[in-house]
Amino acid sequence: MAIEMLYFAWVREKIGVEGERVDPPATVATVTDLIDWLAARGGGHAEAFEDPARLRAAVDQHFAPLDTAIAGAREIAIFPPVTGG
């Protein structure tokens, strides 16, 4: 199940790319699982995902809590909390 990942703001800066295509194993069932799996790659991924509480996600362009299932997802965006002003 290939997923198009999109990264924004400091998440993108730490990872070093604005996006990538990933094919997580079947054991990766939620956004949290995906973040943990990506962090295990080390480097910028580990740094960007070291504190999942600081992250937000969108699954197929809809804001989603990190415990959202990713089965069938085509695109997942990871970004810091959005603030207005």
Image (tube, rainbow, N blue to C red):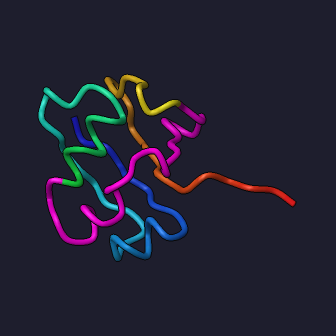
The residue that appears at 15% across and 53% down in the rendered structure is: 40
Residue 62: say if magenta: yes
Left or right for 53, reference 32:
right
Quadrant (top left/top right/bottom left/bottom right) for the N terminus: top left
Residue 73: percent from left, percent from top: 38, 31
Q: Is residue 9 above or below residue 64?
A: below
Which residues are the magenta region? 40-64
Query: Splitting the image into 4 quarters, where does residue 26 fall?
Result: top left
- In the image, is 65 to the left or to the right of 17? right
73 within the magenta span = no
Rendered residue at 49%/51% (across/down): 54
Query: Is residue 4 placed above or below 67 in the rendered structure?
Result: below
Count of all numbered marks drawn on residues in the image? 0
Judge left or right: residue 79 versus residue 43.
right
> Is 24 placed above or below 77 here?
above
Residue at point 52%, 63% (across, down): 8
Q: Residue at x 54, y 68 (%)?
A: 9
Q: Position of residue 58 (x, y in %)?
A: 53, 40
Q: Nearer the viewer, residue 43 or 29?
A: 43
Q: Give coordinates of residue 62: x percent, y percent.
A: 59, 34
